[in-house]
Amino acid sequence: MSNFEELGLAAPILRALAESGYTTPTPIQAQAIPLVRTGRDLLGIAQTGTGKTAAFALPILDRLSAEGGRPPRGGCRALVLAPTRELAAQIAESFRTYGKHLGLSVAVIFGGVGYGPQRHALAGGIDILVATPGRLEDLIGERSARLDKANILVLDEADQMLDKGFLPAIRRLVRLLPNAPTRQTLFFSATMPTEIGTLAREILTDPDRVAVAPVASTAERVAQRALLVEQNGKRALLAEVLRAPGVGRALVFSRTKHGADRIVKQLEQDGLAASAIHGNKSQNQRERSLAAFKDGTAPILVATDIAARGIDIDDVTHVVQYDMPDVPETYVHRIGRTARAGASGEAVALIGPEDLDSLKAVEKLTRQDIPRQDRREDQSKPMKAVALAPRGGRGQQQRGPRPQQNAGPTRAGGGGKPQPAQAPRGGPPGAAARGADASRRRAAEAPRRDRGWAGGDFRDAPRRQGGR
């Protein structure tokens, strides 16, 4: 299809698209929109930056506008689940942009902010609700939200939700929705690991399938290279990469929150303006960092993987892996932040001995060799892989094989029985608790907080077989 008019969308939607400068649908949009408009379930596979949001937002807006009616009090007509608050906010903004001439209501719900405005938004009913699973479950638990009238369900970035351990929450939420065939379910993902197929079989009914890129493929316009370096040489090499000609906006990925803050301090000491975004940052801090990144005040954004998806910013010229990700599929999502909307970009990985196995895993997944350049001081011997030391702390895992989604790590990081994240409410704090900051204690005391936006842990604590 060469234009949106051929897709049969309502005139107000076409007007909004034209006002936003959109004239030609992307491949995922051209294939998915006609199928979604038939009311059938859909499994859509497309890499980041290909227009997945509009592929489901446009037909949903078209359907809700045509059906008319009012949303139920405390509920919604369409529910979109997303893994991160950045992505949820941007999906909601897309719905508002495309549907601005339709008069439909849109609300976004995520953790890390107050409950009051979200309760107020839900009270009168919402046409389109975009939410992260944890906060939505909280509101349902206190009877501020209901899902029994939501006849459209979208799981966006489904594989990321599985990586974050949201599988139990998704299953619980699906049980609260109308059953098929009353419910239409749209399942979108950038990669297709085995767990996605299992969940898809559970909640989709005879779905159509759309795939516009090979599974786990990387964007064609991204030039990739790996720089071999000693671990203690990464700082200097990062500054060199970011000072190179042609570097505009650059995303730098760190494995940990503290590591991201440390990298920002080092870059500032090297005369480079940077800011960080991760789970320990407040919503206001995250918004300020994104604003500085967009307007060029701080053109370097250092992020943990909460930002691998959900940052929808054009003209990101470079993505730098200061640390390689634990899961190879995450590499695909990280570099998908550049080379968007037809532009080109560059992905640079700083590979120390602890990253070498991860690089090989990425090459195996993507079925391509990433060009390597040895930047070590001593190049007389080949680099040998070194196992990454286990990382302690709440919400952190030892690096290794991809975890089983049904039995993720416990909150306390130990084996055996699931343990609480902190001391029980009202109990005397131990030595570790006394050293924790106030925000972490509040997060531990808040029942079922949004899976740890305050603490950086996105996983659901595993449940015991036969337990409560």
Image (cartoon, helix red, strand yellow):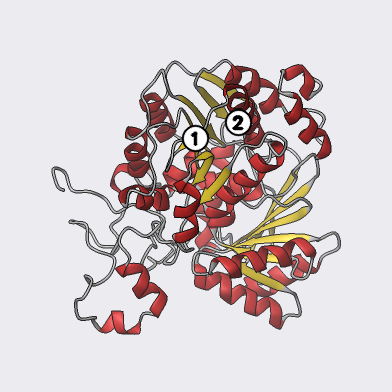
Q: CA distance from mark 2 to mark 1?
A: 19 Å
Q: Which mark is residue 364?
A: none
Seen as rendered, the residue at the extreme right is 245
Q: Could you say which is closer to the camera, residue 18 or residue 191?
A: 18
Q: Secondary structure at mark 1?
A: loop
Q: Quadrant of residue 443?
A: bottom left
Query: Which residue occupies 74% across, 70% down?
Result: 298
Query: Which residue occupies 64% across, 40% down?
Result: 95
Q: Measured from the top left, where is residue 70 in percent x and y?
A: 52, 32
- Residue 380 can be seen in this image: no
Q: Measured from the top left, where is residue 329 in percent x and y?
A: 53, 44
Q: What amino acid type should be assigned to the residue bearing mark 1?
A: Pro
Compared to 290, does 171 lie above or below? above
Quarter placement of the N terminus: top right
Q: Measured from the top left, where is residue 229 in percent x and y?
A: 63, 66
Q: Measured from the top left, where is residue 142 in percent x and y?
A: 32, 52
Query: Which residue occupies 50% across, 58% down?
Result: 117
Compared to 464, does 291 lie above or below? below
Q: Earlier in the sequence, mark 2 or mark 1?
A: 2
Mark closer to the observer (2, 1)? 1
Q: Which mark is residue 71?
A: 1
Q: Which mark is residue 56?
A: 2
Q: On the rendered structure, is 455 left or right of 291?
A: left
